[in-house]
């Protein structure tokens, strides 16, 4: 069931268009991540749903209600911000109870609801503390409890994890997912961090310049990015400029030449006439060890090792390939043996033809 629908949402600040006829549907119980670089219009989109900004034109429907006609505090929409926005002079209990009191919830109900909500964010023992006596992660949990205690249909998250360190970000991200199952809210989550979007989103809307450039599941946007911008923004990528495309096609594959004269095969289809770039994910590439060449199935590229970085879970190898400006990146996971390469050593790598995307 559709919960939230944005229709032709358009927003101008002065003469600058920041959201450009955006259309988006969020299903009931879904978590939709708005992901994009700074300035792409994701926070403005969220602010319009929350009612802190008014669209220049377009409509926002929450179920069958036109939200743009409803005052912000009557929208049944919860908000979780980056900076927690707790009342410093109120205890944790009173911060969480604040909204219930304002909504006129009977006193007899308030204690139970606040305690249940604090328990669900693992802060049952902290109700008498003040925000300044809590860590950043705990403060953000109070902010979550304060929002969820009101049981809103829709919860809007504006980069709520970005003030926290990497480990805590992941832990709290997982908690938000579990809380969503428990409270059954629909969520829109703004972030510029692709890992966060992959962790939290049932679907991800990738934004650029006020538009949604791709909408899909984390797997879809990662495996089949629609253009070089998305490929580059989500995960690591090797984007190689194409020099020449018509070097012969078989029924299934097409051979193209990239800068430096290297030949690469791609799966032929109707969409790849006149492409300008080849894209290969670093983790779909392997180092050639056995010298067994299978050019029906694999592409090969030879260069010299520029650097090799060990991250604990993988190796990242940068390879200088003739004619290609940026190092070609290879990420090797699940290594059973240590990798040893000296600087400048010649290296050949291979990847499956089917893992080669073109734009
Ligand atoms: N109140 C405002 N008045 C004028 N321009 C604004 C206003 N709010 C945002 N903008 C501009 O609109 C554009 C989009 O801003 P927005 O905050 O939506 O981007 P964002 O994708 O959320 O970026 P960030 O991650 O940096 O917050 C930016 O160029 C910004 O400078």
Image (spheres, helix red, strand yellow):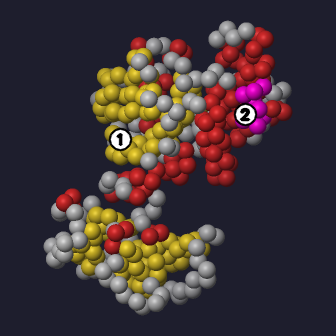
Q: Is mark 2 within 8 Å of ligand 1?
A: no
Of the pair 30 and 13, the residue shown nearer to us: 30
Residue at position x 77%, y 10% in the image: 107
Tell me the tag on residue 17: none
Q: Is mark 1 within 8 Å of ligand 1?
A: no
Magenta segment, prevailing SS (helix, strand or loop): helix
Quarter holding residue 19: top left
Placement of the C terminus among the 4 image quadrants: bottom left
Residue at position x 81%, y 32% in the image: 124
Residue 88 in the image, given as x and y percentages of width and height = 73, 26
Q: Which residue is mark 1?
A: 212
Q: Which SS class for mark 1? A: strand
Left or right of 133 on screen, residue 271: left
Mark 2 or 1, which is nearer the eye?
Answer: 2
Q: Which residue is mark 2?
A: 120
Residue 131 in the image, given as x and y percentages of width and height = 75, 31
Mark 1 Cα shell of 10 Å, populated few (<14), some (14-19), many (≥20): many
Residue at position x 38%, y 71% in the image: 326
User: Would residue 138 be visible to someone looking at this image?
Assistant: yes
Left or right of 333 on screen, residue 209: left
From which residue to which does the magenta span run? 115-123
Residue 299 in the image, given as x and y percentages of width and height = 34, 78
User: Would residue 10 be visible to someone looking at this image?
Assistant: no
Please report contact status of discs 2 and 1: CB closer than 8 Å, yes or no.
no
């Amino acid at each position: 069931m559709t919960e939230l629908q944005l229709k032709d949402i358009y927003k101008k600040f002065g003469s600058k268009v920041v959201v450009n006829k955006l259309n988006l549907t969020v299903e009931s119980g879904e978590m939709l991540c708005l992901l994009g670089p700074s300035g792409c219009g994701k926070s403005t989109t969220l602010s319009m749903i929350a009612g802190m900004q008014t669209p220049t034109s377009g409509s926002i429907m929450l179920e069958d209600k036109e939200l743009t006609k409803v005052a912000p505090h009557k929208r049944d929409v919860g908000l979780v911000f980056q900076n927690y926005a707790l009342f410093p002079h109120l205890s944790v209990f009173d911060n969480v109870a604040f909204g219930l009191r304002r909504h006129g919830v009977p006193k007899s109900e308030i204690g139970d609801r606040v305690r249940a909500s604090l328990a669900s964010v693992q802060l049952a023992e902290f109700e008498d503390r003040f925000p300044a006596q809590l860590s950043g992660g705990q403060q953000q949990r109070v902010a979550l409890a304060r929002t969820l205690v009101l049981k809103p249909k829709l919860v809007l998250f504006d980069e709520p994890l970005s003030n926290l360190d990497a480990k805590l970000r992941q832990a709290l991200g997982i908690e938000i997912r579990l809380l969503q199952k428990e409270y059954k809210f629909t969520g829109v989550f703004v972030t510029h961090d692709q890992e966060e979007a992959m962790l939290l989103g049932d679907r991800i809307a990738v934004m650029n310049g006020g538009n949604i450039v791709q909408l899909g599941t984390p797997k879809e946007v990662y495996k089949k990015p629609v253009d070089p911008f998305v490929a580059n923004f989500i995960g690591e990528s090797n984007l190689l400029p194409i020099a020449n495309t018509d070097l012969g096609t078989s029924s299934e594959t097409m051979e193209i030449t990239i800068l430096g004269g290297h030949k690469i095969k791609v799966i032929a289809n109707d969409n790849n006439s006149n492409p300008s770039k080849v894209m290969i994910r670093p983790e779909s590439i392997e180092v050639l060890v056995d010298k067994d060449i299978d050019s029906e199935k694999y592409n090969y590229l030879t260069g010299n090792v520029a650097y090799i970085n060990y991250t604990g879970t993988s190796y990242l190898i940068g390879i200088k390939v003739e004619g290609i400006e940026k190092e070609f990146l290879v990420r090797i996971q699940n290594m059973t043996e240590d990798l040893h390469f000296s600087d400048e050593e010649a290296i050949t790598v291979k990847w499956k033809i089917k893992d080669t995307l073109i734009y």
